[in-house]
């Protein structure tokens, strides 16, 4: 167990928690590196047949660590987005094993993208999806634009992203952003584990072939490049720099 990411094996299921609660589980470099390693090991371990991903406290994940992200050069920003899209987000979405996100609160920006990369999403009335990076003049860099459009349709995706809407649990369920809504937040992870345990009992080849066929319609191979470039360009634009500076000034 590390300061940032906690793992626990429940039978054939790996439970992965982002446990950096004091930052609302934002994705700093250490968390991203640890998750990359954990997902590689999960992919290779034949005894593990499903994954549950969740956060601790009030947030599932609140996206990239804004301070460290803004310190990157434009070139480094593009590489950062591309590398982790391929190492984490694409690995989750294209994994031969089923993945379930237990969305225990805020899923903002990259946190929403993380949930979208999973096969199933279970939430509560406290679950909230949004893309606050649009208020900073950025475009999501980890495949979330494409995955959101595929999941809820282009019109709804534009509404969520460009109108900067906050989508809470019941509405998320109605539009297909959530697979299931749990009434009691205390039972959220247990329900996600129950779902994952059922998936883990399926024929692995059945799961692999089904996901492979469906993933033919998933994020194109070039998408990590396209979204990495668009994020790198937009996040370093004069408009974005001004909005980020205003954001940090408000926090002082």
Image: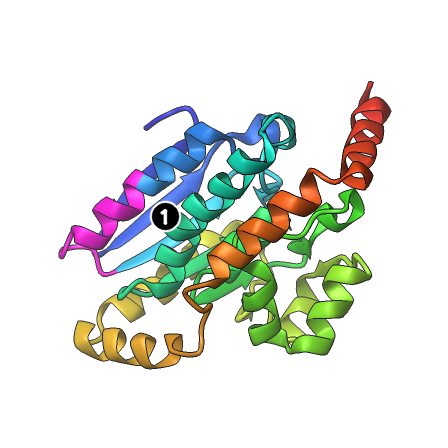
* Res 105 visible: no
First to last magenta residue range? 37-49
Q: Secondary structure at mark 1?
A: helix
Q: Is residue 32 left or right of residue 46?
A: right
Residue at left offset 77%, top offset 46%:
137
Q: Where is residue 197 drawn, in percent x and y?
A: 29, 63
Q: Magenta stretch containing residue 43, yes or no? A: yes
Q: To which quarter of the image does residue 211 belong?
A: bottom left
Q: Residues within 10 Å of mark 1 (few under 14, many from 20)?
A: some
The image shows residue 205, relative to residue 37, as above or below, that is below
The foreground one among 212 and 22 is 212
The foreground one among 70 and 213 is 70
Residue at left offset 61%, top offset 42%:
62
Quadrant showing the N terminus: top left
Quadrant showing the C terminus: top right
Mark 1, residue position: 87
Q: Where is residue 227 drawn, in percent x and y?
A: 56, 55
């Amino acid at each position: 167990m590390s300061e940032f990411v906690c793992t626990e094996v429940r039978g054939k299921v790996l439970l992965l928690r982002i446990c950096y609660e004091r930052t609302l589980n934002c994705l700093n470099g250490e968390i991203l590196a640890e998750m990359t390693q954990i997902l590689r090991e999960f992919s290779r371990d034949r005894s593990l047949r499903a994954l549950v991903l969740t956060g601790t406290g009030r947030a599932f994940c609140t996206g990239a660590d804004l301070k460290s992200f803004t310190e990157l050069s434009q070139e480094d920003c593009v590489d950062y987005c591309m590398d982790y899209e391929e190492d984490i987000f694409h690995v989750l979405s294209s994994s031969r094993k089923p993945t379930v996100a237990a969305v225990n609160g805020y899923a903002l920006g990259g946190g929403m993208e993380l949930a979208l990369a999973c096969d199933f999403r279970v939430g509560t009335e406290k679950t909230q999806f949004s893309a606050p990076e649009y208020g900073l003049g950025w475009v999501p860099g980890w495949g979330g634009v494409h995955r959101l459009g595929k999941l809820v349709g282009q019109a709804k995706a534009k509404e969520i992203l460009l109108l900067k809407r906050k989508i809470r649990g019941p509405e998320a369920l109605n539009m297909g952003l959530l697979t299931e809504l749990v009434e009691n937040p205390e039972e959220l992870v247990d329900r996600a584990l129950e779902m994952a345990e059922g998936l883990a009992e399926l024929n692995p080849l059945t799961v692999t072939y089904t996901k492979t066929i469906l993933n033919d319609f998933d994020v194109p191979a070039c998408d990590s490049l396209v979204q990495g470039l668009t994020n790198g360009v937009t996040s370093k634009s004069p408009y974005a720099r001004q909005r980020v500076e205003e954001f940090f000034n408000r926090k002082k």
